[in-house]
Amino acid sequence: MPQAPPIYENPKPVCVMDASGALGQTLVERLLNQGYTVHAAASKQSDLNGLKKLLGENKQLKLFRFDPFDYQSIVDAIKGCYGLFYMYEASQDQSTYDELMVEVEVRAAHNVIEACAQVETIERVVFTSSVTAVVWKENRKSSVDVNERDWSEPNFCRKYKLWHALAKTLSEKTAWALAMDRDIDMVSINAGLVTGPGLSASNPYLKGTPEMYEDGVLVTVDVDFLADAHIAVYETPCAFGRYLCFNHAVCLPEDAVKLAQLLVPKAPCPPPSDELGLKQQRIQNKKLNRIMAEFAQGTHLELYE
């Protein structure tokens, strides 16, 4: 996607937290390339060392170690920044993603948004959530397409042990409630399954995959598109609310086979099964597509010039 020029000739500093994962690293790299000073915050020193090695010496890159349960370390990382890109880098293994992880992620979201309220320079927060915070509910078979207004139902998630969906739903709701209470300008990106290095069949997002495919809501997003979407909603003054983010819907049997191969590369390649059938896509991201189109054309600021 073509990169639109940033809002400011000399962009104000921003923070990427947690910068240790694929999305965080991609965001840091893109923001630096656009001239931003970036506070890259990670919870492990080894991740910070990896970032430094990946990006080299750059005077506009400042590294911070933070603990999502150490309020002061969060404040230190975002102090002097005008924007925050926040994503929680949780376990990528279903076997370790349990109900306790839900509590951890909710507490972390609360602490980060509360810290933003105490840093006077913060102008916008981009909160990374998930499509799993949107699609899981009792009445999933309705004919109405899923969009940003929908929320997964916590009781449904608990009933079927959909811990990833529950964590994303409750942490995002917590962030929204606190952001509104503290008068923080926040937008959220509800990402599909992020494809790229490190993706495997044990990813907690994938619990309930057959049902998501059957419902027409199984969607994926590559990390480059996802990073571009974060920057687009950050730099577009009129961006608001939630944005479903994906650039591929898995609705055909051959698409399902390709995803299976991506998840388990060494497994035998099965032929597309007629039993899977063609599914009608029942999830829309028109709201994000409009923002992305305007951003690519450089028209996202016209009303504000």
Image: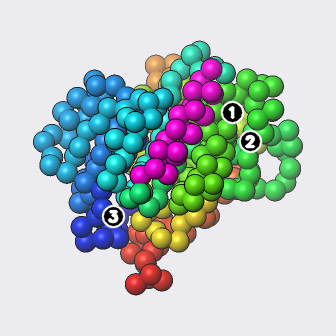
Tell me if mark 2 has few (under 14), some (14-19) or many (20+) residues whose alpha carbon lies within 10 angstroms of its own: many
Is label 1 in contact with label 3 (beta carbons under 8 Å)?
Answer: no
Location of the N terminus (image quadrant): bottom left
Q: Magenta region, mostly helix, strand or loop?
A: helix
Q: Position of residue 275 (x, y in %)?
A: 76, 32
Q: How far separated are the C-alphas under marks 1 and 3?
A: 34 Å
Tell me if mark 1 has few (under 14), some (14-19) or many (20+) residues whose alpha carbon lies within 10 angstroms of its own: many
Q: How far separated are the C-alphas under marks 2 and 3?
A: 33 Å
Q: Amino acid at mark 3?
A: Gln
**Mark 2 lies on residue:** 152
Q: Amino acid at mark 1?
A: Leu
Frontmost residue, 56 versus 2: 56
**Residue at 63 percent of width and 27 percent of height:** 102
- Per the image, label 2 sits on a secondary structure element best described as loop
| Of callouts 1 and 2, the N-terminal one | 2
Q: Position of residue 89 (x, y in %)?
A: 46, 32
Q: How far separated are the C-alphas under marks 1 and 2?
A: 8 Å
Q: Which residues are magenta?
A: 100-119
Horizontally, residue 128 falls left or right of residue 249, namely left
Quadrant of the image occupied by residue 207? top right
Scheme of image coloration: rainbow
| Of callouts 2 and 3, the N-terminal one | 3
From the image, state whether disc 2 or disc 3 is nearer to you: 2
Location of the C terminus (image quadrant): bottom left
Quadrant of the image occupied by residue 11? bottom left
Is label 1 in contact with label 2 (beta carbons under 8 Å)?
Answer: yes
Q: Position of residue 86 (x, y in %)?
A: 46, 44
Q: Amino acid at mark 2?
A: Ser
Is label 2 in contact with label 3 (beta carbons under 8 Å)?
Answer: no
- Per the image, label 3 sits on a secondary structure element best described as loop
- Per the image, label 1 sits on a secondary structure element best described as helix
Quadrant of the image occupied by residue 158? top right
